[in-house]
Image (cartoon, helix red, strand yellow):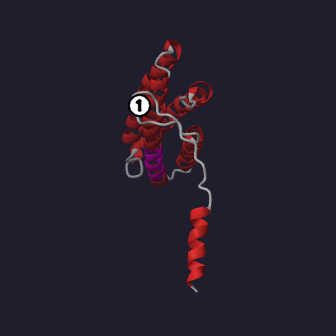
C-alpha cells in the first residue's frame, strides 16, 4: 500500500526539470531579459486601446458614469504599463546599450518623451475623473480625449516599431 506513495514521489523526483533559460542581468542591475516582456507590453497596448474605444463609446452614448469608471481602469492599466516599461525595459536597455551612443540617446529620448506624455495623460485623467458626477466636464472632454488618443496612438506605434526591437538578451 505504501509503495503507491513511494512510486508517486519517486516519479516526481526522477522526472527531468523543465529547463528554463537563465539570461544574464543588465550590467549593474538585477534586471534580467524576459522573453515574454515585449508581448506583454504589446498586449498592454491593445488593452489600453480597447479601453479607449470603450470610453469613446460610453461618452458618445452620454453614459458619463461609465466613462468615469473606464477612465479609472485606463489609469490603472496605463500606470501599470508605464511602471513595467520604466523598470523592466528602459533600465535594461539603458544598461545593455550603454556603449552604443546612438541607441543610448534614442532610449533616453523615448524615456523623456514618455515622461512628458505620461504627465499630460495623468493630468487629463485627473481632470476628468469626476465626469460621472460633473456633467459640465463633458463639453471639453471630446476634444481633449481625441488629442490624448492621437498622442498615445502615435507613441504606441513608435515604441513597437523602433524601441521594442532593441530589446534582446544580454550575453
Q: Quadrant of residue 41?
A: top right
- Horizontally, residue 73 falls left or right of residue 18, namely left
Crowd rating for badge 1 (residues with CA inside 10 Å; few <14, some 14–19, many 20+) = few
Residue furthest to the top in view is 101
Please state the horizontal and vertical placement of residue 47, each as a whole percent of the image.
57, 45
Q: Vertically, is 133 above or below 12? A: above
57 and 160: which is toward the camera: 160
Please state the horizontal and vertical placement of residue 156, each as a whole percent of the image.
57, 32
Q: Vertically, is 82 above or below 5? A: above
65 and 32: which is toward the camera: 32
Q: Vertically, is 117 above or below 70? A: above
10 and 119: which is toward the camera: 10
Please state the horizontal and vertical placement of residue 42, each as a whole percent of the image.
59, 39
Q: Residue at x 56, y 43 (%)?
A: 40
Residue furthest to the bottom in view is 1
| Quadrant for the C terminus in the image | top right
Please identify the dominant SS of the magenta region. helix
85 and 76: which is toward the camera: 85
Please state the horizontal and vertical placement of residue 29, each as a whole percent of the image.
40, 32
**For mark 1, what is the residue?**
120
Q: Residue at x 41, y 26 (%)?
A: 116
| Quadrant for the N terminus in the image | bottom right
Q: Residue at x 42, y 51 (%)?
A: 132
Q: Residue at x 48, y 37 (%)?
A: 32
Counting the numbered discs, the total is 1
Start-end of magenta stretch: 69-77
Q: Is residue 86 magenta?
A: no
Element type where label 1 sits in the image: helix
Amino acid at each position: 500500500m505504501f509503495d503507491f506513495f513511494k512510486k508517486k514521489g519517486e516519479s516526481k523526483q526522477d522526472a527531468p526539470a523543465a529547463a528554463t533559460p537563465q539570461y544574464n542581468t543588465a550590467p549593474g542591475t538585477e534586471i534580467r531579459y524576459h522573453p515574454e516582456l515585449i508581448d506583454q507590453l504589446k498586449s498592454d497596448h491593445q488593452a489600453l486601446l480597447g479601453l479607449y474605444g470603450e470610453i469613446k463609446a460610453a461618452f458618445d452614448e452620454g453614459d458619463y458614469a461609465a466613462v468615469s469608471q473606464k477612465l479609472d481602469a485606463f489609469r490603472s492599466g496605463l500606470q501599470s504599463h508605464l511602471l513595467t516599461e520604466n523598470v523592466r525595459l528602459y533600465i535594461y536597455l539603458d544598461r545593455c546599450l550603454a556603449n552604443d551612443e546612438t541607441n543610448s540617446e534614442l532610449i533616453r529620448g523615448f524615456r523623456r518623451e514618455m515622461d512628458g506624455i505620461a504627465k499630460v495623460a495623468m493630468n487629463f485623467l485627473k481632470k476628468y475623473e469626476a465626469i460621472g458626477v460633473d456633467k459640465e466636464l463633458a463639453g471639453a472632454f471630446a476634444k481633449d480625449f481625441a488629442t490624448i488618443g492621437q498622442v498615445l496612438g502615435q507613441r504606441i506605434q513608435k515604441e513597437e516599431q523602433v524601441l521594442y526591437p532593441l530589446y534582446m538578451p544580454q550575453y
